[in-house]
Each structure stands twice: as structure tokens, then as C-alpha cells.
Image: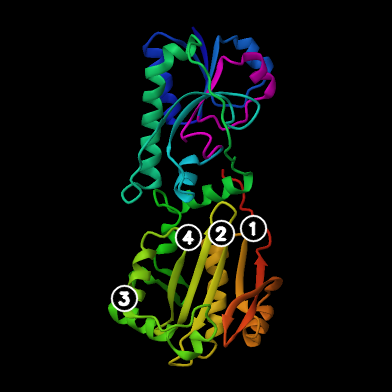
Amino acid sequence: MKLLLLGGNEHSIELLEWLKSIGEEVIYIEEKVNLELVKKLSPDFVISYNYKHIIPKEVVRAYYPRIINLHISLLPYNRGAYPNVWSFLEDTPKGVTIHLVDEGVDTGDILVQKEVFIDEEKETLRSSYLKLHREIQELFKENWESIKTLKIKPIKQHGGQSITEGNTAYLSHLSKKEDGIHPSENLRRNIELGDVLLKNFVNLSDEEVEMVRRWRNHPEVRRWMYTDHEISKEEHLSFIETLRHDKRNFYYLVYKVDKAVGVLSLTRVDFRNRNAYFGIYGNPEEKIHGAGLILEKSAISLAFDVAQLHTLKLEVIEDNERAINFYKRMGFEEEGRLREFVFKDGRWKDVIVMGMIKKGSVPEQPL
């Protein structure tokens, strides 16, 4: 059988070599193809594996159902680019799928697929990526004879979501920045922003843990929190322990040089849509000059420069006028109200939602 293999990296080459070893005649192409070229090559079957271009609809129509794609996700979960990364970020089932190519992006009927267990405590982006490629090549080899003779009954996909162009570029940025590191790990470590250190709560010493608890229980801090009960040592330690495996909420003790300035949080982080909420409070035991400005600028830099978010939001109780005016001076705009959202001081109070959008925050396309 004469095959056209549309590939794009070393894994495609591995499959090419295997197909040749079993006697298949294979034409290998990484460049963008069109119908005229494909017809000239006249293959009996088309295989796409790590191909970096959208296959023209005319080619799909001409070769369907003798055109398939190998995709390293358990479709319909995580269509499009960087499927293994999204499976970590969105905590979706992980696996590999061989499916018919239709006119959508990874939306064709499923031929065969396999769920793959990934130990998120041990695997990195790199190791999970390699594991999924090993699995999909084995799945292909086991089923190739039935696939090429059209003996497998396709199963339609239902649900799922594709990745947008902007998010693809964003994930390329994350992957290149810290190869083999889960994106959330970039926020779980200590982060240096010039002479400011954001020390993640999971890395605090016993003395720092107790200091933060003492701050959080200070009347000047508690008065502006949703919950204003006094936090016990056990409750505080339990909270920090949950952060060790939390992929959406990150808390930091902020130092400027050797001064403990306050606490900064980046919460409800949505890596797909690139948004999050933040919160800050200053050291109530030692008034640091310009603490609010240090914390605010650190939050913005963390969100837009480190996490590469597009939108940053905050919530503030309606009668915290000092904070509201400060946020406005920093460029945040009021976006709405959560009516009677918290009960404090014997009455229901509104919460104001404010936000900031990073200008030009879609990163450049990867090379």
C-alpha cells in the first residue's frame, strides 16, 4: 500500500521507519500540502502524525475515510495543540486517540483510543509527552492492519473543546520557558522580581508560617476579609498543606530586600482563558513605607509577566474606600458588583469587582 505520512518531528520519523520495516511504501512530508500535490503523489492512504499544518478540506474530502490522525489526548478531551499540557491544567482524562480526519480540528470519528495513567506527582510535561507518544505508536502498530483495511467501525465524538491560537502561543511560551515543568509549578516556586522576593507559602519556615497566621488574625487585616474568625494553628497548617497540590491558588509572603512587606495571593487561576484574581494585605505589625505599592506592582508583574495572564481581577468590600481608590489609581476599573455578598459588622455588604486587562497580551507565535 502506498502511504502519505504527514509528519513534523522525530516521533513521526520513528513511525515512518516502522512502516517501512513492515514493507509499506511511504512518502514523508512535513511541508504544507494541497490537493494538487496529494493527487500527484497518488497515495492509497493518508496518515497525519505531529503535522503542524491544517490539512486542506479538499484533501480531506478526496481521501475520507482513508485519512487518519494520531492525537495524544483522550478525545474529545483536549483537541488541538499541546493536548498533554491541557490535560494537566484542566485535570481531564489522559490518553491517546487515532481518529478519522474531518474538516474540524481533531473532531473526526474515533477509530481506536486508550486511556493512559499519568502520575502527576512524578511526571513532568516532557516525560508525559514522551510516554503518550510511545503509547500512541504502540496503539497504531497493534491496529494498523484493521485501520488500513477499514475494518474498524468509527465512533462519533461528543463534546470537547479546541485550543485557540492565542492559547497555543501561550503554552509554547510556558513550555520553552521551563522545559519539563508543569506550568503551575512556575507559580508554586519562589519568584524574584528585582529586589522583591515572593516566597511561596509552601516554602515558608515554621517561623514564617506562624508570622503569617499572626498577621491574618490581626484586627486590621481580618476586618476586610470575607471570613473574620480567628484562624487556629491547625487550620492554618491544613490550608498551607492543600496548596502543595493546588493548581489554581498560589500564596506568597512578600519581601523587599530583608523586610517582610505583606502577603500576595493569585487565585482561581484559569490557564486556558488566562485570567485570575489577586489579593494583598500589608504587614500589620511593622508599617513598611510604600507597602501597598510594592504589593500591587508585584501582583501585576506576577500575573502579566510571569504567569502571562490576559486579565487580572480583584474583589473588595464596598466600604473599603481607601483600597478602592488605591486600585483605581493603579489602573483597575470597576466591572460590577456582587450584591449583598458578605455579612459583616451586622449587615450584608456588596463586593465590588475590579479588573485590569494587559494590553497586547497575546504572545507572538512560536518560531
| Residue occupying image coordinates x 64% and y 20% | 60
- The amino acid marked with disc number 1 is Ser
Where does the image place residue 301, in percent across and percent down from the top left?
Answer: 55, 69
Pointers 2 and 4 in contact (C-beta within 8 Å):
no
* Tag in front: 4 or 3: 3
Residue at the disc numbered 2 = 308
Q: How is the image coloured?
A: rainbow
Q: Is residue 77 magenta?
A: yes
In the current view of this chain or complex, which residue is farthest to the front?
Answer: 346
Gap in angstroms between the C-alphas marked 2 and 1: 8 Å
Magenta segment, which residues?
50-79
Residue at the disc numbered 4 = 248
Query: For this view, does 264 lie left or right of residue 138?
Result: right
For the residue labelled by badge 2, is the local secondary structure a helix, a strand or a loop?
A: loop
Pointers 2 and 1 in contact (C-beta within 8 Å):
yes
Nearest to N terminus: mark 2 or mark 3: 3
| Residue occupying image coordinates x 37% and y 59% | 245
Gap in angstroms between the C-alphas marked 4 and 3: 22 Å
For disc 1, the neighbor class at 10 Å (few under 14, some 14 to 19, many from 20) is: some
Camera-side residue of 62 and 88: 88
- The amino acid marked with disc number 4 is Arg
Camera-side residue of 16 and 162: 162
Q: In this orientation, does residue 362 appear? A: yes
| Residue occupying image coordinates x 30% and y 82% | 207
For disc 2, the neighbor class at 10 Å (few under 14, some 14 to 19, many from 20) is: many
Asked if residue 181 is positioned above or below residue 208 in the image, the reply reads above
Residue at the disc numbered 3 = 234
